[in-house]
Image (tube, rainbow, N blue to C red):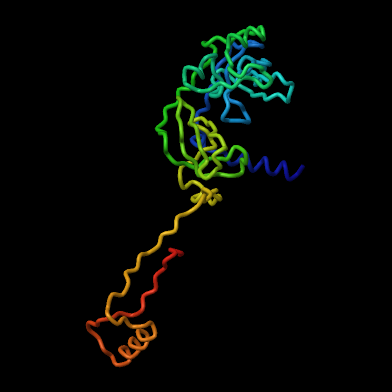
Amino acid sequence: DKALKKTLEEAEKVTVPADLFTEQYEVEEHSFKVGWKMEALHPTMASRFCPATVETIIDKRFFLVTIDDLTGNEKKVMCCHSGTPFIFPMGWCETKGIKLTGPQGYKTSDFKWNDYLASQNATVAPDDCFITPMVEHEFERGMKLEAVNPSQPNQICVATITRIVDHLLWLHLDGAPGIVPNHVVEATSFDIFPVGWCESNGYPLKTPRKTGYRRKVAVVQPDCRPNPMSADEVRSATYSQIKAGEGGSSSWCPKIYFNHRCFS
C-alpha cells in the first residue's frame, strides 16, 4: 500500500504532454437492430467474406456481429460500430468483384442472398446504417512492406500488396506456400509497417523462404597455345620470376582460380 501510494504521488507530478496524443475517432450512434443481416470479413480467416448477423446491441454506439454458421459450431463474434471497416451492406462484395462465401452448413454452393434470406426469414440491414471509412492512402498493387502473420501474430514477414479495394489491402506473405491465401487488412492497420521497420526497431523479420536457385557456371576459355604450361610449371615460373625481380609483359600469367559454382 505504501509503494502504491508513493507511485501515485510521483505520477501526479509528471503528466504526459497532450501533443503526444492524437485525436480519437468519435464513434457515432448506430441504428442497427438484432437479427439484421450484412456482409463481413471473417475475424479469424481474414481472406473470407461471409454473411453475418447482428446478435446483440450493447449500447447506442456498439453492437455484436456474428458470422453466420448453420452447423452449430463455436460462434465467431466481433464487436462493431457503424464505421467498423470490416462490415458491409448486402451486395457490397458483388459490386466489388469479391467472392462471398456462404455460411458453413449451407447446402447450396452458389450463394445467393435472396434465397438465403427467404430460407432464414431474415431482414437485411439498410445501406444507410453503414458509415464507409473515408481512408486516403497511397498504397499500390505490387508494393512491398512488412506485415504481421495472422496465423502467428508474433511473427512479422515480408509481404506484397496483391489487391486493393477501397480501404482494404490484400497481402501475400512472401515465401509462404502457394496454398496460403492472401489476407485482408485495412490501410490504417497497426499490423503493417514500412520496409526497414523491423531492422530499425530490433525486431526479427521473417524473410522469404528460398524455393530453389540456379547454378551459374563461369565459362573458361581453353588455352589455345601450342604447348600450354602445366600448373606446376606456372607455379615454378612465377616463383622464379618473383625471386629474380623480373617485371614487364609476359606470355603467361599466374594461376587463376575460377569459382565455377558461384559459392560465396
Tell me where residue 154 sits by quadrant. Answer: top right
Q: Quick one: quadrant of the C terminus?
A: bottom left
Left/right placement of residue 207 relative to residue 119 reads: left
Residue that protrudes farthest toward the bottom in the picture: 244
Q: Determine the residue positioned at 25% across, 86% down.
A: 247
Q: Position of residue 55 (x, y in %)?
A: 68, 16
* Vertical side of 50 occupied by 127: above or below: above
Quarter of the rendering containing residue 88: top right
Q: Quadrant of the N terminus?
A: top right
Give percent across and percent down for residue 99.
53, 22
Q: Position of residue 70 (x, y in %)?
A: 70, 18
Q: Residue 13 in the image: x percent, y percent? A: 60, 41
How many marks the image carries: the answer is: 0
- Is residue 35 depicted above or below 213 in this figure? above
Up the image or down, 99 lies above or below 232; here it is: above
Q: Nearer the viewer, residue 228 or 31?
A: 228
**Front residue (pair 147, 136):** 147
Q: Nearer the viewer, residue 107 or 73?
A: 107
The vertical placement of 51 against 19, above or below, is: above
Residue reaching furthest left? 248
What residue lies at 51% left-to-right and 48% top-to-bottom?
208
Tell me if 34 is positioned left or right of 133 in this view. right
